[in-house]
Amino acid sequence: MPPIGPRCLSMSCLSLLLAVVVVVLATMLATFDMITSRGFLPIRVRTALNSVPFFNSRQHYAFSDLPDNLTGTTILITGASSGIGHEAAKLMAERGARVVLGTRGSRARLKSIENSLGPGVAAPSSLDLASFSSIREFVRSLSDLGVERIDSVLLNAGKMSFGYEEGELGIERMMAVHHLGHAYLLELLMPLMLASQRPRVVFVSSSAHVFSYAEGIRFNSTPGSFGFYFQAYASRKLANAVYVRALASRLEGAYPSKFIVNAVNPGVVTTPFAWYQLYMPSLFSATPREGALSVLAPLLDSTAQTDGYYDPLGLRLDWYHDTAYWWTCDADLRERLWQWTSAVLRDAHRIVSSTPTGSLILDRNVL
């Protein structure tokens, strides 16, 4: 038998080393966990893996954890015509909650959505979050519906633009829909939320926030500064996350132990939100009903506290260790977003003679 040469030995060692690396990586991915992976993988890799069902099997909040009876509870959900919002509305209605839908469409379309969800669900008027006048009209329609208080608000509506689109007041439409429209809606809803004993607010953010522009949030996008569409989308979802932190802090200061405000990353979900999501294999994409469970966890979990960021499994994560901390934990960025948002909303509201009681931004008695 001829002797084994150095070249063969080195190839054997290399093959063995490669096999070990593959086994280690496969084991890490198969047993991936956001907590135990801290310090081992970059945050962008961790958040991406955390958003894919194939790598996540340890559910922290399950369907069995949902309350059996929500009779007497009023919840408002934006973006409920399909996908996550529609399934969340269905889950709430099945448990007896009164569900108010904020979605765009004709009266006939809204009626069709109501009928598809059953009793206890109402869409009083069309809600276009890129239009401040539409938001005001929607809130006014709640009184006609007999809504006297709102216990929970799920801010789920979103928009994916593949190029720059301008809306009211010269504001880019994705920023209007994802952030400013929701912020304005909340301010107008303050009297109804204050009537609730322990109101909850959940912003649907995204793991995409870690891929935002270098500066984080691009406040005043123009056709020339819009850039790559996914970065623009990521910037708007980052705005959701950062605003949650600013809002939670200010609400706690104005109304101690009253509000619970959180953000959630529902992960990759098969919905019509972006065309490519409809073609994702089931191993790598959750169903809309599973996505709905993710966003309802911080809204219904009895242990939920304010100023949190939840993952698709219903686990409350740590802002510093599990998000783009260089932005989400930046107090200066948080303050700049709050001040910019306040200026835009006050400008949008200046034509209205009255102000919503209790609003942090529009009611001067609270400031």
Image (spheres, grey):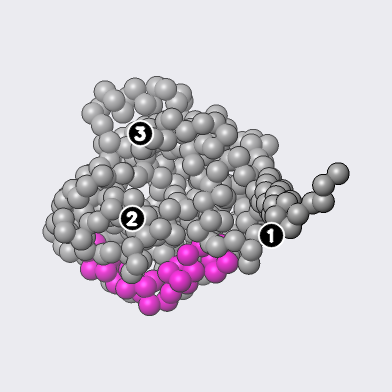
What is the spatial separation of the Cα atoms under label 3 and label 2, in whole angstroms? Answer: 17 Å
Q: Quadrant of residue 38?
A: bottom right
Query: Which residue is rendered at x = 41% and y = 64% of the image?
Result: 242
Mark closest to the chain's N terminus, 2 or 1: 1
> Three-letter amino acid code at disc 1?
Thr
333 in the magenta segment? yes
Camera-nearest residue between 151 and 249: 249
Instruction: Tell me the residue that label 3 is attached to.
Output: 275
Looking at this rendering, what residue extends furthest in the right direction? 1
What is the spatial separation of the Cα atoms under label 2 and label 1, in whole angstroms? Answer: 28 Å
Q: Is residue 316 visible?
A: yes
> Three-letter amino acid code at disc 3?
Trp
Which quarter of the figure is the C terminus placed in? bottom left
Which element type, helix, strand or loop, lies under badge 2?
Answer: helix
The image shows residue 174, relative to residue 347, as above or below, that is above
> Three-letter amino acid code at disc 2?
Gln
Instruction: Tell me the residue that label 2 is attached to.
Output: 231
Which span of residues is magenta-colored?
319-345
For residue 47, side relative to residue 100 (left or right): right
Residue 266 percent location from the top left of the image: 50, 45
What is the spatial separation of the Cα atoms under label 1 and label 3, in whole angstroms? Answer: 33 Å
Instruction: Tell me the residue that label 1 is attached to.
Output: 36
**Crowding near pointer 3: few (<14 within 10 Å), some, many (20+)?**
few
Residue 148 percent location from the top left of the image: 40, 46
The image shows residue 330, relative to residue 27, as above or below, that is below
Query: Which residue is rendered at x = 65% and y = 59% of the image?
Result: 37
